[in-house]
Each structure stands twice: as structure tokens, then as C-alpha cells.
Amino acid sequence: RGQQPNWPAQPRTEFAVSVVYDWASGKYWPVHVDSNPFCSGVGFSANGNVLAFGGEQLNAPWGEQWQPTLVVEGRNKIREFDIHTSEWTTLEDELPGNHWYPTQVLLPDGRVLNQGGFVSMVGPQNEMFEIFDSNLNKLITYHNSTPFAVNRDIMNLYPFFSYLPYMNPESPD
């Protein structure tokens, strides 16, 4: 009670931007990712794998210690972390625009909604939203704007989304 967990000694992860922690063994290790995932939005696919949409530019003016490990621009990428192999894959499909701090929501049919964020660290807001089919690992559609993302004087970083089942207001039962 009130004590910090007894974390194991840190392995050489000074250049890692992704690390896996195994609760059963108490060990952790770095996992390579080639496109810059900082500032990406993270969600889940239908099979439980982790999806990371968007991210940061390749040569960000900060983070010099891990820059040599990243070889690909990240703001328009879709990455999948396989929970069985503990490996990241940057998918072939790219987002039609940059996303910096977007949000993802897994829909009941296995599709993933990606929306929000900025185009870069200094803006403007990204008004696009995309639908990604996590069963096919393909970007299936995108739209250039959404009414709730246009002309807002708010920060559209990691917007909050939730899936709610449809309810007919005329017959709520």
C-alpha cells in the first residue's frame, strides 16, 4: 500500500520508442518500429492487435537520442503491433493526410474510425476522418471534413469518441 512497484533493471532501451513488458516474467525489451510513432493515436483492431495512426515528422526538432532509429516519416502512417509476435509493421496503406494526436474507435463490425488531431505540431486541425477495415488491414474510405471538426476554436487533439449502440428516439425500448 502506497509503495511503488519493484520494476526490474532497465535493459538498454535508450534508443527505443516501443517497449514490451511481460507481467508474468517481469521482463521488458525494446521493439523496433521504423516510422515515427510519437504523437500517434493508438487503438485496437478486431483481432486484438494494437493500431497506431499518424505520428510525428521524421526529423522532429526534439528527441535526438532516438532519431537514428527512425527511418520513415510517421504522420501519415498506419502501424500494427502483432500481439503474438511482438513486432510492429508499417502497413502499405497511408492516411490521405497527416494526423498528429488523432483518436481511434473500434466499431462492432471490425472497422476502425480514425479522426482528429492536427496536421502538424503547429496546426491546422485535421478535418479528415478515415475508416480502416481491421479485418482486411486496409483503409477503405475517408472524408475530407466532418461538421464537428470544421471551424472549431478548440484543440482537436485526442478527441473523445465512444461507440454507442443505435437507439431510435421514437421507440427507446
Image (spheres, rainbow, N blue to C red):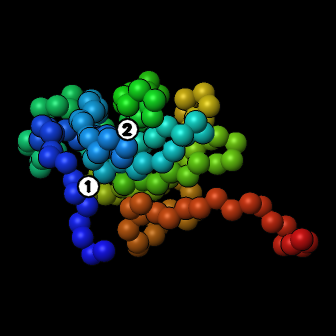
Left or right position of 109 against 20: right
Q: How many marks?
A: 2
159 and 84: which is toward the camera: 84
Disc 1 target residue: 121
Disc 2 target residue: 76
Q: Residues within 10 Å of mark 1 (few under 14, many from 20)?
A: some
Left or right position of 41 against 104: left
Residue at 45% x, 70% y is 152
- Coordinates of residue 141 in the picture (x, y in percent): 60, 38
Q: Residues within 10 Å of mark 2 (few under 14, many from 20)?
A: many
Left or right position of 115 against 74: right
- Coordinates of residue 82 in the picture (x, y in percent): 44, 31
Which quarter of the image is occupied by the C terminus? bottom right
Between marks 2 and 1, how big is the CA–CA gap? 14 Å
- Coordinates of residue 115 in the picture (x, y in percent): 50, 52
Which quarter of the image is occupied by the N terminus? bottom left
The three-letter amino acid code for the residue at tag 1 is Met
Q: Is residue 7 above or below residue 77?
A: below
- Coordinates of residue 167 in the picture (x, y in percent): 80, 66
73 and 90: which is toward the camera: 90
Residue at 36% x, 46% y is 23
